[in-house]
Image: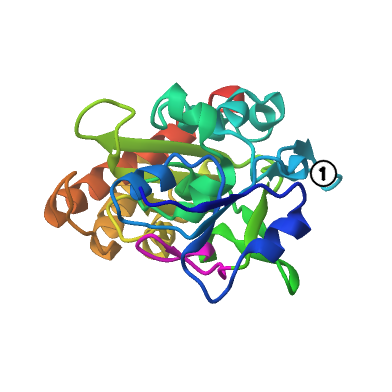
Amino acid sequence: MIPFELAEPASLGEAIKLLDPDDASVRPIAGGTALMLMMKAGVFRPARLVSLRAIRELSAIATQPDGALRIGAMTPLSVLERSAAARAHAPVIMQTLRTLSNVRVRNVATVGGHLAHADPHMDLPPVLIALGAHIAAVGPAGERTIPVEALFAGYFATVLRRDELITAVVVPAQGTRRAAYLKCTTRAVHDWPALGVAVSLERDGDSIRAAKIVISAATEKPVRLPGAEAALRGGRDDAALRRAGDAAAEEAQTIGDGQGSAAYKRQLVRVYVARALAAALDRAGATH
């Protein structure tokens, strides 16, 4: 790696002042699990890294008065995995984190860095989209709210400006909604997925009143599938789940990579969307 400056601000305001909107070689660093690998490979050669580790205000997990869960951007993934508040709020988050990479990575990687990196193979983004989460981002112009669904602009790209930082992820109260996340890996369960599927369902008696279906890893960025959601609405049997899977396979714009071809991933979408919907319907309380 080439030499670079490391700044360690103690406050959010100080960190923002150290960022340069016109210089791509100035970058914030949270856990650094992805950024350091990019630097070692020579993909990124920073002039300055702005460490966020000393900013304590970014590490809290708290339930808000409206029932939403606010997760500080510098919260390590392993801390979120063990959080009683997160488990009570949306157990699918804990379930997802158990197979996200390995515990060594989760001990260092942060929630905000996980999202800002914008790797389409990441596990949490589709889950947070299905749960209706948004982020708080702060820059020189103040704070703005961005739905996680709107955060990703493309492959390894977000809508964040260079002088903006994610400060928190906010997951709204889930009520009676049920959620599930499934992923297909070509090797070990914690490897990069060939496909990730997150779903969230709201029932009306025995039928499904509303659904969110989100896929990742098989596409350039995490995406919702409104056509599949519409195909499922009002359904109540296995045939409805298969219809949604077929609709998802038709709708998804899959891409090929080291985890599989575009055609292979399209077939995975067909199968795993139906399986994820079945998992959400079968699980309740602390198990979903």
Tell me residue 237's x, y (percent): 38, 41
Residue on which disc 1 sits: 64
Residue drawn 20% across the image and 53% down it: 266
Numbered-mark total: 1
* Range drawn in magenta: 151-162
Relative placement, left or right, of 8 versus 198 is right
Res. 55 image quadrant: top right
Residue 48 versus residue 205 in the image, above or below: below
Residue drawn 52% across the image and 59% down it: 27
Name the residue type under label 1: Gln
Q: Secondary structure at mark 1?
A: loop
User: Would residue 131 be counted in the magenta stretch?
Assistant: no
Residue drawn 64% across the image and 27% down it: 87
Most distant residue in the right direction: 65
Tell me residue 166's x, y (percent): 63, 56
Residue 147 versus residue 170 in the image, above or below: below
